[in-house]
Image (cartoon, rainbow, N blue to C red):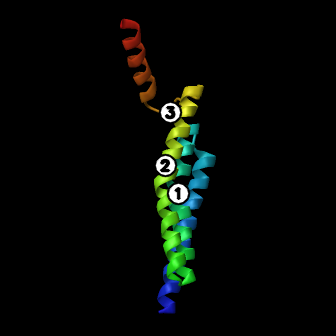
Amino acid sequence: MELVAAVIVAFLLLAGALFALVAAIGIVRLPDLYSRMHAASKAGTVGSGLLLLAVGVHSQDLSILARALAGFLFFVLTAPIAAHLLARAAHKAGHRLTPPSVRDELVKDQMVRHSYKTKG
């Protein structure tokens, strides 16, 4: 049983570290704020959650594993929402997309809202 737990912990650690590495590379290499925020929120959330689960499985204590699962769910539910709100705030503050980005849906949405306000 200990060998199975050790293999599971090793897999979770390696997978979590790989996702964290991908998030770090994405933060460094991606062209604009929004792409970087996407990499940090998606891959970073999964990576930190897998590392947290590895700690919970390694402890071999049910209460610690339950807390690790609760922490993982908290990460998965809150990090993408927080990244979305930060990206909206950055867009409203004037940070624009880089030229390789194809569309800016929020600019279209703001133009439609502005046209409704001026008509009525």
Do the residues under discs 2 and 1 have CB atoms within 8 angstroms? yes
Which residue is disc 1 drawn over?
A: 45
Judging from the image, what secondary structure is the residue with disc 3 in?
loop
**Numbered badge on residue 85:** none
Q: How many marks?
A: 3
Rounded to the nearest whole Å, what is the CA distance between mark 3 and mark 2? 23 Å
Query: Residue 9 placed where, x, y %?
Result: 53, 79
Looking at the picture, tell me which residue is in the foreground, 49 or 16: 49
Which residue is disc 2 drawn over?
A: 80
Q: Residue furthest right?
A: 28
Q: Quadrant of residue 119?
A: top left
Identify the residue at horizontal 45%, vertical 23% (top origin): 107
The kind of residue tagged 1 is Thr
Examine the rendered structure and indicate whether residue 4 appears above or below residue 39. Answer: below
The kind of residue tagged 2 is Pro
Identify the residue at horizontal 56%, vertical 39% (top origin): 86
Examine the rendered structure and indicate whether residue 108 appears above or below residue 53. Answer: above
**In which quadrant of the rendered image does the C terminus lie?**
top left
Q: Using residue 1 as the reference point, say whether residue 90 is left or right of it.
A: right
Earlier-in-chain disc, 2 versus 1: 1
Judging from the image, what secondary structure is the residue with disc 2 in?
helix
Rounded to the nearest whole Å, what is the CA distance between mark 3 and mark 1? 26 Å
Which residue is disc 3 drawn over?
A: 100
Query: Residue 98 placed where, x, y %?
Result: 55, 31
Residue 98 seen in this snapshot: no
Rounded to the nearest whole Å, what is the CA distance between mark 2 and mark 1? 8 Å
Query: Residue 97 placed where, x, y %?
Result: 53, 30
Query: Residue 41 placed where, x, y %?
Result: 53, 50
Looking at the picture, tell me which residue is in the foreground, 97 or 56: 56
Mark 3 or 2, closer to the camera = 2
Residue 63 seen in this snapshot: yes
